[in-house]
Amino acid sequence: MTLQQLKYLVAIADSGLNITAAAERLYTSQPGISKQLKLLEQELGVQLFTRKGKSLAAITPAGRDVIARARRIMREAENIRNLASDLSGEQEGTLSIGTTHTQARHVLPDVIKEFRERYPKINLELHQGTSEQIAELVAANRVDFAIATGSRQLFPGLVILPCFRWDRIILVPNGHPLTAVKSLTLPVLASYPLVTYVFGTTGESSLKKAFAEQGLEPNVVFTARDADIIKTYVRMGMGVGIVAPMAYECQDRKDLAALSAEGLFPRVTTWLGFRRDSVLRRYMVDFIAMFASHLSPQVTRKAAQLATQVEVDGLFDEAALPLKVGCEAPESEAA
Amino acid sequence: MTLQQLKYLVAIADSGLNITAAAERLYTSQPGISKQLKLLEQELGVQLFTRKGKSLAAITPAGRDVIARARRIMREAENIRNLASDLSGEQEGTLSIGTTHTQARHVLPDVIKEFRERYPKINLELHQGTSEQIAELVAANRVDFAIATGSRQLFPGLVILPCFRWDRIILVPNGHPLTAVKSLTLPVLASYPLVTYVFGTTGESSLKKAFAEQGLEPNVVFTARDADIIKTYVRMGMGVGIVAPMAYECQDRKDLAALSAEGLFPRVTTWLGFRRDSVLRRYMVDFIAMFASHLSPQVTRKAAQLATQVEVDGLFDEAALPLKVGCEAPESEAA
DNA sequence: TACAGTTACGGACCGCGTAAGCATA
DNA sequence: TATGCTTACGCGGTCCGTAACTGTA
């Protein structure tokens, strides 16, 4: 049994049991992979795949177990390499992030700009998707970091670092009757057609629940994954928008008004997660600090270390987290 | 980086940074190890050991981290091999157990006899020592199972399966005044010189504590690790023995009387532990079932599986565990 | 006919063991 | 002088890539 053989094995599993594809992925020859797989099965004395003719048809139960452990070995091997790269002052590497639209569009650009200036040689990969898609990326070890809001239960085995919290805001066209309302309530809101994020993920279904608790049935006329689209339809007068505050940019003030919905819906928390046991290179830790300033390198390292033993909980006070808000004072007036 | 290199690295660390010793342990040549270590350090770009002249002097911080992960990789590799051996119906293997004197002398012989009949080809290793020594064996991955009483906090990262509980008994020579006492109390006991196990391990210090709670200072005139020695000194009239009930064998009735100490001291639990993430081969699971019949293969497998995710707790009711006692009715009279 | 995997073969590489060299106590 | 690591070198194995072969849609 060699690391090479385990790498090949995992590659086969990741290539849909297609040895040729695995060979291409690994920039090597197909017969080489075939042979090593055969050798491994011989040494272990177990069939890892069932064959249909010559092709691989399915993974055997034994194979599933072996592959799972092979993955762990490959991860640890990767960890050793990362660890060594970092300690030897290597400036190259990759940072791969899976995140949702809201973060990718409204929060990450500034952070990434700063990061690229500081670490120009680091290859940055950003994968945007739903929470479920991000969870898959995490499970497949395709991303280093997951950044999302709510829905933590989708991410078992991740070290979760709360980054910031926010209250949804209400978006209406300037001059909309709601702008005259002193204190917004759910019944008032429910009397308007609503435009908001797609329900389903835990974070957003809490919105539905808030209405339900007061016996209200909101009239949601349009849902999207994307605040830009929501804003477009709000501008068209199709309904009242409920979005993340980060999505309200200063230029939106020209035609859109943002009303506070604080207290109407539960406050949500955006977090950053990484795989327990993964080695955090210096630039990764620094990225986290750029993303959430209270997560200093020391705090992050501490959390990573604790997580190898127990569940990270109560490392710091979540209630004391910075509260994220949208554009409050227009830049033009301040200047 | 190869599995071979990591194996060498771990061997060096386990041989006190002596490459020659590591080579002997692995039945290979010393220059080979040297070369592979050099190659590994080159590839990683990190010094894993500090040198003093040509000899290895100490492990660098980087080395410590790399070695820890290398150990994990070696364990997983071993797991894969075990897994495969088991599934391919391999009847050979090794079962290595670290345990205390009480278990090794009074409980395990019967279990091992049965096990050897059932699995004659399995190589059985028994290492007897104090809880601390067993914990070291576990940490060094030298044993598959640890069997001990109390002192669980010495064994982090182990899946602990409670096996049975017991109350200490009081041993005195036949005709001793205490045999006439109706209900034994701590003050009465404290008025006699005592002979018991070495204090220090958590299990035994609970004994001292029981006395202290009633403001008593027991007069312990002799301590040993070994019930046989304790019995010898009790026979000599040196004092009153406090031992595990399993140590009172039927032949001891000839000259020793066992008095119940139930209620005087806290009831203790003997458990069996194995490393989280370790692959349990069929014969290992069967051994556990032989050792504690309520730990059926199904229960053990379930516990092992759960342990990969969370702490095993409340899997079954500890209060319902079988209560272990010593020789109650003499075989001769019953026959 | 394409596609996927196995078998066969030659070359390069690499890891191992022996033997000799060198530093340290 | 003994111990322990490094360097040098030859051998054997092995891994890889190319090429030809075989079984399947």
Image (cartoon, coloured by chain):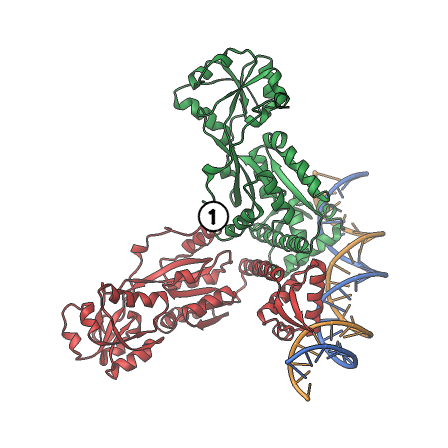
Chain colours: A green, B red, C blue, D orange
Q: Is residue B221 above or below residue A247?
A: below
- Residue name at image x 62 percent, y 16 percent: A254
Q: Quadrant of residue B126?
A: bottom left
Q: Amino acid at mark 1?
A: Glu
Q: Is residue A238 above or below residue B76?
A: above
* Left or right of A234 in this view: B247: left
The residue carrying pointer 1 sits among few (fewer than 14), some (14 to 19) or many (20 or more) residues within 10 Å by Cα, namely some
Q: Height in image: A257 above or below B314?
A: above
From this viewpoint, is residue B289 visible?
Answer: no
In the foreground, A40 or B312: B312
In the image, B84 versus A71, the foreground residue is A71
Note whether residue B164 is visible: yes
Residue receiving disc 1: A311
Q: Is residue A228 left or right of residue B124?
A: right
Q: Quadrant of the C terminus of chain A?
A: top right
Residue occupying image coordinates x 59% and y 52%: A72
Look at the image and tell me in which quarter the N terminus of chain A lies: bottom right
Q: Is residue A12 left or right of residue A207?
A: right
Residue A291's x, y, as percent? Answer: 59, 38
The location of residue A190, given as percent across then percent down, is 45, 16
